């Protein structure tokens, strides 16, 4: 092994240490190549990035969306300064609608002015067939229209608030058939892969289709972002007459991308500037500011280029990868700087090559093992089962590897072309702190142990309080348009988050031929009855669309509408109530109901029937909106309660009831977080324990080394539990990341302690020397990381705030544990045997 190491170091020395300028030129070429592709770097905050990729509910949701329509639309809320129904306000509303309709990629706009009216004044079934009135028609009675709209079972809390002061417009994007077709093909091939039926040809096709879908998605997202910007510009033209907010899934996705972009730029720059200051204060030499930041910049640009080259998007979860890479790469260079300074002070007359060679020989293996453990920590995210978390783990594993390569090529090569100069004499504040901790541990070991037992207890009890229930609205600060728009829609327009309940006909129901109707239809002497209407029609073939089953549908509707978590509920019941206003006879005569269904104008059918019933009438859809701002919202409990009541209380078969929608998909992802957190932590601890066994070759030292990191991770999770901070797709990564970074300190400390212990076999003397040397590097890196992450607290995206503060806190706890508990356990359990030369004396 030593021969292999010597050979490898010889090659490294030849390529890097003897030819530093060639190394720098090669590194510049590599960085330049990837910097070019960094222009293709892109962000993705679509709804698909917040759900489980192989969730069966996702496939069902997409099928239902294809049948009844998706939620890919914008909502513009309009609260005028004057009365909503005043002529000049309606004129302004019409102008706004017409402008929005002209935006490219917008297919239609539905506003208060476009909704059909049947009671303003009342119309008959004959008149409905000829067409219906809207607010803009000259023969519409405005007073009756106002009363009808405010009392309407469909429009109230959908188009207009109960107070009548706020209305909403639905801005529908044009359906992109190419995008939908690519998605359908991709999902069909993924389904075949999931069940193991994918042929080699299918595999190639899946790769091609996935690539085509990703490229086309970029195009669609750009079009939607442009359209949203145009919509906002149009809204700004009307803000002097009304208060307007923009909502909808596409807007949330677009704004989230913008938040990520701002965070990448501002916090990347903020961390960079902060590190300049910190390095300047800590090391007081320009080279120790410029060279580490040059290495960090090269790492960041290269990783962005890799992402751009492979068209690998950054999601909400991975949005902090630049800051993480800067900080991790910086920690590597700090360890090198501290070791270089130690060697320089020990041998002030040594030439630069000797100092750099000693620095590399001393720190390469500890840094390599530290990087490997960090990669293992990020790699543990691969078992989470959550696609954006998995991609984040892969991304960071590659990025950390790039940082390691540059830290041991670019950085030492740049140092070599500089002269060593004289050792800088500076006030050793870090050394005073770390040696003070060593003295405290030596003199007060039992109180220190009691302190950490208490910390462990706090962590364990807090972990028991962890929850995955959180509100999507809380992801955003209350000053953002997303938050204010969602809050307004929740309070005034019947809720925000879409939930759908689909009820099928019983499995035993079979289609039967309609019996010939022999009744006398002399009463129907108008145009509603012709030669084609010689049967009972859909009411005889449909399971649900008849007067026998509509009371059951009403019972389901009223139950869903009565739930405290639900706002607006739309179903066939609302439509039926509108039809009864036109002709009460539809509630008594199936034949008349069938005729109404057949002769109803298509625009009315699209409003009243098609969104809530399948074409054959054997499937019902209840479109529900849930109050996202409700602090008592428990999604999983709500879904279970609905399914239980419908099957056990109302007697529906289990196979008939399907609960779907974005709320269900998001809930499935949240519910998987417990399992994912356990899996990721289990994998990271077992993997690091195995690596410790290989590295330390001492099972007792491996166990001792893992303890401080377990405690730091446990305390962070416990703090989340005590503070009521829920697990989400970002906070689930904190523990694994904190362990992966913090365990680097453990490796560096144990490595240095082992070397110091071999000198004289004195445990406490070795601990004191280790604190005075590697302890300073641990202090600099941990404080840098913690303060660097604290900058993320300024983000508008609340999960990023939690991520920054909690990760920084975890690093400080891990630092304290590695400088107190770790040496105390080493001193108490003595995992390393005293060296032979000490025993001989």
Image (spheres, rainbow, N blue to C red):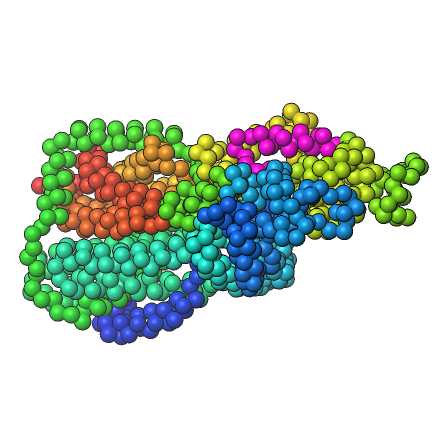
Taking 109 as reference, is 578 left or right?
Answer: right
Residue 276 in which image quadrant = bottom left
What is the tally of numbered marks visible in this picture? 0
Q: Which residues are magenta?
A: 549-570
Q: Position of residue 269 (x, y in %)?
A: 28, 59
Going 8% across and 59% down the picture, which residue do you hit? 424
Q: Is residue 312 magenta?
A: no
Taking 594 as reference, is 301 left or right?
Answer: left
Q: Position of residue 323 (x, y in %)?
A: 31, 55
Q: Position of residue 664 (x, y in %)?
A: 55, 40
Query: Is residue 552 or residue 297 the one in the foreground?
Result: 552
Does residue 115 sit above or below 678 in this rendering? Answer: below
Q: Is residue 773 visible?
A: yes
Going 40% across and 68% down the picture, which residue do you hit? 39
Which quarter shows the C terminus?
top left
Going 19% across and 47% down the picture, which residue do you hit? 779
Q: Is residue 552 magenta?
A: yes
Query: Is residue 773 or residue 10 the one in the foreground?
Result: 773
Taking 623 as reference, is 450 left or right?
Answer: left
Query: Is residue 22 or residue 399 the one in the foreground?
Result: 399
Going 44% across and 54% down the picture, which residue do you hit? 239
Does residue 335 sit above or below 614 in this rendering? Answer: below
Residue 631 in which image quadrant = top left
Residue 118 in which image quadrant = top right
Q: Position of residue 577 (x, y in %)?
A: 69, 36
Which quarter shows the N terminus?
bottom left
Query: Is residue 561 or residue 319 the one in the foreground?
Result: 561
Does residue 733 sit above or below 204 in this rendering? Answer: above
Q: Is residue 664 visible?
A: no
């Amino acid at each position: 092994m030593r021969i292999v190491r010597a050979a490898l170091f010889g090659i490294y020395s030849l390529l890097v240490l003897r030819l530093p300028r060639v190394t720098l030129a090669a590194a510049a070429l590599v960085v330049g190549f990837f910097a070019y592709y960094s222009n293709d770097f892109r962000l993705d905050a679509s709804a698909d990035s917040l759900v489980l990729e192989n969730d069966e509910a996702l496939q069902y949701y997409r099928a239902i969306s294809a049948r009844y329509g998706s939620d890919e639309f914008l909502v513009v809320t309009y609260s005028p300064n004057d009365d909503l129904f005043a002529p000049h306000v309606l004129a302004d509303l019409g102008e706004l609608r017409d402008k929005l309709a002209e935006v490219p990629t917008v297919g239609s706009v539905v506003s208060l002015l476009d909704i059909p009216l049947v009671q303003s004044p009342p119309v008959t079934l004959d008149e409905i067939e000829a067409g219906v009135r809207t607010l803009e028609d000259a023969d519409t009675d405005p007073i009756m229209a106002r009363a009808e709209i405010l009392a309407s079972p469909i429009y109230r809390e959908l188009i207009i608030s109960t107070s009548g002061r706020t209305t909403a417009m639905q801005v529908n994007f044009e359906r992109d058939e190419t995008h939908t077709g690519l998605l359908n093909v991709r999902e069909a091939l993924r389904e075949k892969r999931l069940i193991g039926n994918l042929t080699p040809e299918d595999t190639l096709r899946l790769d091609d289709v996935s690539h085509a879908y990703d490229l086309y998605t970029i195009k669609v997202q750009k079009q939607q972002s442009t359209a949203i910007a145009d919509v906002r510009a149009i809204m700004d033209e009307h803000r002097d007459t009304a208060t307007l907010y923009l909502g909808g899934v596409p807007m949330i996705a677009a704004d989230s991308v913008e938040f990520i972009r701002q965070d990448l730029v501002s916090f990347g720059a903020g961390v960079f500037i902060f590190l300049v200051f910190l390095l300047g204060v800590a090391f007081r030499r320009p080279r120790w500011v410029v060279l580490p930041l040059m290495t960090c910049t090269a790492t960041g640009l290269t990783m962005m280029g890799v992402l751009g080259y492979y068209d690998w998007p950054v999601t909400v979860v991975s949005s902090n990868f630049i800051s993480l890479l800067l900080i991790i790469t910086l920690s590597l260079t700090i360890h090198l700087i501290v070791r270089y300074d130690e060697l320089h002070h020990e041998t002030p007359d040594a030439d630069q090559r000797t100092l750099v060679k000693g620095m590399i020989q001393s720190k390469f293996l500890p840094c390599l093992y530290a990087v490997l453990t960090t990669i293992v920590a990020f790699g543990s995210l691969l078992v989470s089962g959550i696609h954006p978390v998995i991609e984040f783990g892969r991304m960071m594993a590659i990025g950390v590897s790039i940082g390691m390569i540059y830290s041991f090529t670019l950085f030492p090569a740049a140092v070599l072309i500089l002269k060593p100069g004289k050792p800088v004499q500076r006030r050793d504040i870090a050394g005073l702190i770390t040696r003070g901790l060593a003295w405290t541990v030596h003199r007060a070991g039992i109180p220190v142990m009691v302190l950490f037992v208490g910390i462990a207890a706090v962590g364990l009890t807090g972990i028991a309080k962890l929850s995955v229930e959180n509100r999507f609205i809380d992801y955003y600060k209350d000053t953002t348009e997303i938050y204010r728009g969602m809050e307004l829609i929740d309070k005034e327009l019947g809720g925000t988050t879409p939930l759908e309940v689909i009820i099928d006909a019983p499995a035993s129901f079979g289609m039967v031929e309609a019996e010939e109707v022999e009744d006398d239809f002399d009463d129907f002497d108008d145009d509603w009855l012709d030669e084609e209407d010689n049967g009972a029609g859909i009411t005889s073939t449909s399971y649900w669309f008849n007067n026998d089953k509509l009371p059951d549908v009403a019972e389901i509707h009223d139950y869903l509408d009565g739930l405290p978590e639900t706002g607006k509920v739309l179903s066939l019941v609302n439509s039926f109530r509108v039809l009864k206003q036109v002709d009460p006879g539809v509630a008594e005569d199936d034949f008349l109901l069938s005729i109404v269904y057949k002769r109803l104008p298509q625009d009315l059918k699209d409003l009243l029937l098609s969104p809530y019933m399948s074409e054959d009438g054997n499937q019902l859809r209840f479109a529900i909106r849930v109050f996202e701002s409700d602090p008592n919202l428990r999604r999983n409990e709500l879904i279970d309660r609905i399914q239980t009541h419908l099957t056990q209380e109302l007697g529906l078969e289990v196979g008939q009831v399907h609960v779907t929608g974005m709320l269900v998909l998001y809930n499935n992802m949240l519910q998987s977080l417990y399992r994912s957190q356990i899996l990721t932590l289990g994998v990271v601890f077992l993997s690091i324990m195995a690596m410790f066994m290989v590295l330390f070759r001492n099972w007792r030292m491996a166990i001792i080394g893992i303890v401080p990191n377990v405690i730091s991770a446990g305390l962070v999770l416990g703090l989340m539990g005590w503070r009521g901070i829920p697990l989400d797709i970002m906070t689930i990564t904190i523990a694994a990341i904190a362990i992966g970074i913090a365990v680097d300190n453990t490796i560096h400390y144990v490595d240095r302690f082992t070397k110091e212990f071999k000198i004289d076999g004195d445990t406490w003397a070795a601990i004191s020397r280790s604190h005075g040397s590697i302890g300073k590097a641990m202090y600099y890196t941990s404080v840098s990381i913690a303060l660097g992450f604290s900058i993320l607290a300024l983000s508008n995206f609340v999960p990023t705030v939690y991520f920054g503060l909690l990760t920084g806190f975890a690093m400080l706890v891990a630092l304290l544990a590695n400088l107190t508990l770790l040496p105390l356990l080493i001193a108490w359990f003595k995992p390393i045997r005293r060296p032979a030369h000490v025993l001989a004396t």
